[in-house]
Image: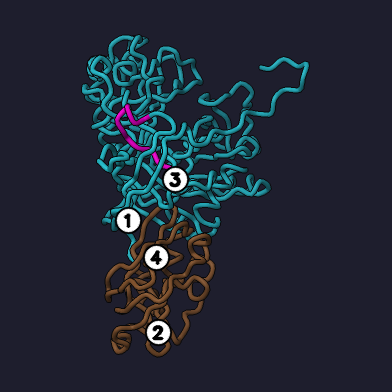
Chain colours: A cyan, B brown
Amino acid sequence: MESVTSPAITELRKTPLNALHRRLGAKMVNFGGWDMPVEYPSSGGLIAEHKAVRSSVGVFDVSHMGDIRIRSGKVPGGALAAVQHISMNDASLLAIGQAHYSAMLYPEGTFVDDVIVHRLGPDDYLVVINAGTREKDISWVRQNTREFDCMVEDLSDTYTQLAIQGPRALDVVQKLTDANFTGIKNYWFTHGTVCGLKNTLIARTGYTGEDGFEIYVPGDRATSEAVWAKVIEAGREFGIVPCGLGARNTLRLEAKMALYGHEISDKINVWEAGLDRYCKMEKGDFIGRAALERAKAAGLTRTLVGLEMVDRGIARDEYRVCNEAGQPVGVVTSGSPSPTLSKNIALAYVPPALSAIGTSLFVEIRAQKCKARVVPTPFYKRAKKAAAPQGTKPD
Amino acid sequence: MAYPPQYRYTKEHEWIDVKGDVATIGITDYAQHELGDVVFVELPKVGAKTATGKSFGTVESVKAVSEIYAPAAGEVLEANSVLQNKPETINTDPHGAAWLIKIKLANPAEISGLMNAAAYEAFIADKAKETSA
C-alpha cells in the first residue's frame, strides 16, 4: 500500500492548536503548507465526523485561514471604495454586522481567491481569505488598495478561528456566550463575551452547508486550547466531535462550495465557476470587470456541473471527463464519496452543450471509462426549518 | 491489533499467509488505519497474474486512492467478493475477513525475503516515530 497523497515537506506552518490535535491523535497532513488535522480517529474518522456535522454538531480548527482588515483613513468611505475595487460582490449593500461571499479577481476575470467580507463598522471591513493563498492575497490587497485612503492590516496570526457547525451549533455556542442571536441570520455576525473573552467576533458562517458559527479568539496557545476545551465541554450533550479537513472537504463538496485550486483558480473565470450571483457587474468598476464583460459576450466554453457516478468507481480531482464517443471533454475538479448521499459525486468542468441535467458522461478512472450523469447541485441542501403551524404567519 | 505470527509482511504494508503453494494476501492493520474509512476496493479477476512488487488492485478511502502491491508472483485463484459490498470490512478485520486475494505462488521461495511479524512491528514503530517527530 502506498498513499498517492503528496509527501510532507519540511517547515510546515502550525496553528496554535497544533499540539492539541497531536495529543488527540489526529492524522495530520500538509494542506497548502500547513500541518493540519485531516481526521481524528478518536472522533470515529472522517465519515463519523461528516455525519456528526450533518446530524448534530462538530468543531473545526480553521485558524489557518487568513484575515485582512481594511479601514478608512482620514476620509470616510476609503475602505468601502477599496473593498469595492478589489472584490466582485457589492460591499455597499452590507449593513454593519453583515457579511457576504465574494472573490478577488485578476484583471483577466479569474480568481485571486474567494473571500468572505464582513462589515465591522462604518469604515471597517474584515476580509477572510484562504490559507494556501495568504501571502499572495495580502500582497495583492496591499498593491491594489494603494490609491485609496485606507489602512490594510494583516491579522492572520492574531486569531484562532474555530468553526462550530451543524444543526446543534447554535445550542453549543449559546452556552458559551451572552450574545443574543435573534436576528443573526446566516452570514450575519455579532460580538459577545465567549468563554470570558470580551468582544469576540461570532459569525454565522461556515463551509459545510449546515447552520454554524465561526468564532475568532486570541491566537495564543493557552487561550486557544482553553476555548477549544470549553466548546467540547459545551457540545458534549449534543455529541460534538473534533472534525478535520477531510470532513470539511466532503461537507463543502456536497454543498457545492468552491475550493481554491479546484473549482476556482487563476485559470477559471467567474462565469465558468457559476458564481454569477456573487458578482455585481452593475456596482461600478472593479478589478476583472472589463474582462468579465468580454467573457460574457464571447460566451462560455466550459461550465461547472455536478456529476453522480452511475458505474462503480470514484471520480477524483483531475480525472478526465469524456463524452459518449470516448473523447476527452473536461476535467473533475473535486470528487469523493458522499457520506450523506452514499453515492460517488464530483464537480467537473465540461462544455455547456454537455451540461444539461441528465447528460451521460464518462469519467476516466485508471484507464476505464466509468459512466456518470449530470445532476442538479448542490448535491445536498439542508432542510428548511419545520413549516409554521397552520394559521400562523410565516416569517 | 496483533500481527499474526504466521504471516509475512511487506514494507508497503501488505501481509501474505502461505499454505503450501497457495497464499492469501491482504493489507495490514497499520495500512487500514493510515487509509481511514475504506469505501471502495478494486481487485483482479480470477486467472490474472500478479508480479512481485507490482500493483494488483486499489483500495480507496474517502480521501485517497492507494495501490496494493503484490508481495509475491502468482496467479489469482480467488478475489474476496465480500469487499465489493462491504469494503469497510478492511477497517474492522484487515487480517481476517478482509483478505483481498488468494494466489497460486509461482515461486514459494521468494516469501523468505519478507518480514516476519516482529520485524514488521519494529518497522512500523520506526515509522510512527518519524511522523511524530
Residues flagged by tags 1 and 2 on a common chain: no
Residue hosting label 2: B22
Select label 4 or label 1 by which is in front.
Answer: 4
Query: Which residue is the site of mark 1?
Result: A5
- Residue A310 badge: 3
Q: Counting other residues with Cα less than 10 Å from the Cα at mark 4, is it few (<14), some (14-19), or many (20 or more)?
A: many
Please tell me which residue is depicted at 58% across the width and 45% down the height of the picture: A231
Q: Which of marks 1 and 3 precedes in the sequence? A: 1
Question: Which element type, helix, strand or loop, lies under badge 2?
Answer: strand
Q: Is residue A215 left or right of residue A316?
A: right
Q: Amino acid at mark 1?
A: Thr
Question: How far apart are the alpha carbons under marks 4 and 1?
Answer: 21 Å
Name the residue tied to disc 4. Answer: B43
Horizontal side of A172 relative to B111 (left or right) equals: right
Cα–Cα span, label 3 and label 4: 19 Å
Residue at point 28%, 34% (across, down):
A265
Residue at image position (41%, 73%) is B101
Q: Nearer the viewer, mark 3 or mark 1?
A: 3
